[in-house]
Amino acid sequence: MKKKLVAVLMTAAMTATMLTGCGGDKAAETADTTTSTATDEAADAAEDNAADAGESAEATGEAVTLKIFSNLPDRKNGQGLVEQMIIDEYMAENPNVTIEVEALDEEAYKTKFKAYSMDGMPDVVSIWGQPAFLDEVLEAGVLAELNEADYADYGFIAGSLEGFKKDGKLYGLPRNTDIQIIYYNQKMFEDNGWEVPATYEDFMTLCTTIKDAGITPIAMDGGDGWPMACFLTDLLVKVAGTDYADIVSNAIATGDFSAPEIKQATQLLVNAADAGAFQTGYDTQDYGTAQNLFTNGQAAMFVMGSWECSMALNEDIPEEIRTNIRAFTLPPMADGKGGANDIAAWNGGGYAVSANSEIKEEAIKFLNYMYQPDKLSKYGWENGVGMSAQDQSPFMTGNETELQKQVVDILKNATSVSGTPINDCGPSAFKTTIESEIQSVSNGTESIDDFLAAIGAACK
Amino acid sequence: MEQAGKKKHPISKVILFIVLLVIAVIQIFPLIWLLDFSLASSNEMFTSGLLIIPEKIQWGNYAKAFVDGNFLLYLKNSLLINFLAVAFVIVISIMAAFACKRMQWKLSGLVQTLLLMGMMIPIHATLLPNYKIYSALHLTDTIWALLIPYVAFSLPQGMFLMGSFLESVPKELEEAAVIDGCGIYRIIFIIVTPLLKASITTVSIMTFLNNWNEFMMASTYLSTPKWKTLPFSVLEFTGEYSSNYAVQFAVMALTAAPAVIVYIILNKHITKGVAMGAVKG
Amino acid sequence: MRKMYSNKLVIFSLVLPGLLVFLFAILAPICLSVYYGFTDYSGMGKATWIGFENYKTLAHDTKFFTSLKNSFLLAVGFICIQHPIAIIVAAILDKLQGKAEGFFRCVYFIPNVISVAIIAYLWKFIYNPDFGLLNNVLKAFGYQGQINWLSADNAIWAVLIVLIWHGFGWGMLIYYTGIKNIDPVLYEAAAIDGSDSKTTFLRITLPLMKPVIQVNVTMAIISALKQMETVYLLTNGGPGDRTQFAANYLYQQAFKAFKYGYGNAIGVVFIIICLVVTVLLNNVIFRQEEV
């Protein structure tokens, strides 16, 4: 009996240790089920039997503690769950590695990140491949350079690595492809006879209709500033079409935001707020509050990125609503250059390794492990967190939620993709300013011209 | 005399009582509201009623709050850090107050002013530079990163109160002790300290109240859960359970509970202590 | 005795811990702040000396002045709303005897022992226009509208209400103690003179409470200046910068906008303002006492 047990543990340990060696191989995908059975006992056993396993020296190295700093505090749902799953697997496969996670939500994360960057960063960190975040970070040289050639067969979508580069060198890897989306409550729409709008004008009419019915049309996280800036980005994409990136980068370079397209988009945002499209008090309410309005049937629509697709699987949300969440993108305007398939989307969040990490090798090893196509991408897909920055087509099963299918279609049908949202295109002083001023301009306490002047001044 | 006045105006007395009652309701109702909804399920929040009777009492909210909020660990940290801070403040302030008030030396006035200056410095202005200092000394994420500023910013008040109480302690006792051959340290800790009991209570309470609720420094200087204090249960939860309001309410009620319960039990002493500090201050 | 009481070594050993804490936790960071205030340090990389550049920027920074204005508003709110109510309630409580008095005092003080973190989140819910307590209370009284308590115009008052609510018990308790310390003989004399309770309050209680009021008011002004935690969690300075406060602003500048040097410059000015205000207030009170 005893012998048998040892034998079982041995095999489990062997599998576990071998898996680490597999690297980015597709073979890992098939072995995946084995991994999940290689439970904690196996991990313990692996530690004991490591010497016998011989070959896999890397897994048997001395005890290493890997610190991960993450912007995903919710470890039981969505993206945070995916991250935690991979961490747990990695620890099971590498018993000598202990991974400590510190997770804060986005605003707090960015604050703490800057504090960390002064003196020693955790080993693996969440980053954003956008100038507002990355420029200063790379300037300070706190991130380790990665070897781009290593990722040739990781299936990254063309162009998705660009935001993470400086002078041709790669410093991080993108996690998601984020699409700016308008989620809506399909059942509520059907019950009231509302239809998904085909034009922006219809969209505004719809908002008025919904408001007249005593329901909040759009739940907006205005307290944080960035979701509104993303919405403004979407408006600008519909106004300016493919000129979006040029207009924005030009404005930021010159500090002159008086371009008619930007003005018009801002005007549309102000008009929408004026018309009561957002909930009362949107300009001070946070992410959770806005989301809860929508997920509790108090609001008909919710403006947010595609990462919130996981709502469809979140059991904290009442089933009746969860299963009825659908999505559309901001419809085109009569006088706008952007078509229905010119979408606001970007590769934002991702991971990087700290340059002064004492265990850089180990950290990069873990990073690469996460990005094996059958990890982040696959688990992300299975947990409905939206689109990864890698090719996900092998993982489509046909059993995806309706919401996921819609988002896939949105991306598949896109004729152009905007790139970085406006607030993340400039230096961080610009980001801080626009995210605060956008509250003032939308609630009418500041004129559009003052708003444009203020964000222009912050670029200098 | 007062009695006569009261008998004359029974109506005004009732009115006054009602005023007091209304204020009491204003002060306490939000907390009752908090308790009420912490036992409901999330979607029951969206009613227009003031209080609700939950369809089913959700004790599970508290279980989640207790476990996922790291309640015990954070409570332990909070208690430990606060007790240590109180102890340091008391010992250091008695020593410094004694030296400045009783001993004879030229710089006593200057040192006293210097130490009291801490009262005027806005604590948050030191957040940025202190972060830099602590990380250079590898003190971030240790208990010292909280203890040092907590002690530093409670010390001036402690010293001030100790000093003013000390002035009312008669010198004769000390003189007798000196004649008996007591050393200074023995005089301070064996003879004088027991006489300062009242002010020690006051300083303890003030220090405790100051630091128990602090989270700005804690959230800047700490990163891992190892030393995090009770307010973190709440701060972390709003991110983790953003889509579950009831659990958020439960964690708020749970973290508020220890201080409120202790206060209600020690009500009289705390009131006395605060009052004494107020009069002296 | 004298010899022993002027032993330099002993004195040194007694004040050393206090001085060390002061040097390390207060003086050193202030010096560092002064240094970084003269640089363009972003928080990472190198710091370049730029002289008074940060201070020049600060002189034209409308947001900083908004934050000072907000501190001022807050102080006025404390003095004109919180303190009068606290004094009157304290005076009424003083007249009550027995259990009721203890009960009210206890209830009034409870919010004070609850962490600011909880208070701020709780009030976020209370203010929520869609399902918050306040609007539901109004609904219960028959009001049908939906008030946005944290709108640009209301937000600063909403913050003030939270702070008044939170700190009410403390202020009340201090006034209560002050009133208790008034010699009852004075009240008896007043009663013999036949003055009613209103006159007694105005003629005897208030004047005798002057020193307590002065101390309390000083504390209120200083705490208005130092305000950060509640605002940080409740509105984080928003909407726009309507509820910005100096401490919150310097934190934002240093850790969010990558202007660590500028944040420190704000910190230095902030410290100076606090020192000046405290000294001024003390002098005013001191002078009045002499008169």
Image: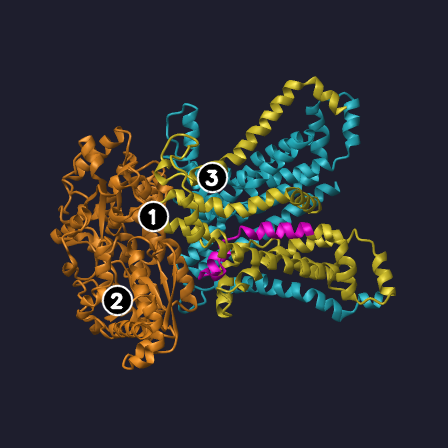
Chain colours: A orange, B yellow, C cyan
Say yes or no: labels 3 and 2 on the same chain.
Answer: no
| Up/down of B148 relative to A272, above or below | below
Q: Nearer the viewer, residue A31 or C24?
A: A31
| Left or right placement of residue A356 versus residue B120 in this view | left
Amino acid type shown at disc 3: Leu
Q: Residue B76: percent from the left, percent from the top? A: 53, 57
Task: Please tell me in which quadrant of the rendered image residue A219 appears.
Answer: top left
Badge 3 vs badge 2, beta-carbon distance below 8 Å: no
Q: Residue C115: percent from the left, percent from the top? A: 52, 47
The residue tagged 2 is A35
- Tag on residue B35? 3
Secondary structure of the residue carrying numbered label 2: helix
Secondary structure of the residue carrying numbered label 1: loop
Amino acid type shown at disc 1: Gly
Magenta stretch in the rendered image: B201-229
The subunit carrying tag 3 is: B
Graded by Cα atoms within 10 Å as few (under 14), some (14 to 19) or many (20 or more), the crowding at tag 1 reads many
Tell me, yes or no, whether the highlighted magenta stretch contains residue B213. yes
Frontmost of labels 3 and 2 is: 2
Graded by Cα atoms within 10 Å as few (under 14), some (14 to 19) or many (20 or more), the crowding at tag 2 reads many
Rounded to the nearest angstrom, the CA distance separating label 2 from label 1 is 42 Å
Amino acid type shown at disc 2: Thr
The subunit carrying tag 2 is: A
The subunit carrying tag 1 is: A
Picture residue at 56% right of the left edge, 31% below the top? B23
Q: Earlier in the sequence, mark 2 or mark 1?
A: 2
Say yes or no: labels 2 and 1 on the same chain.
Answer: yes
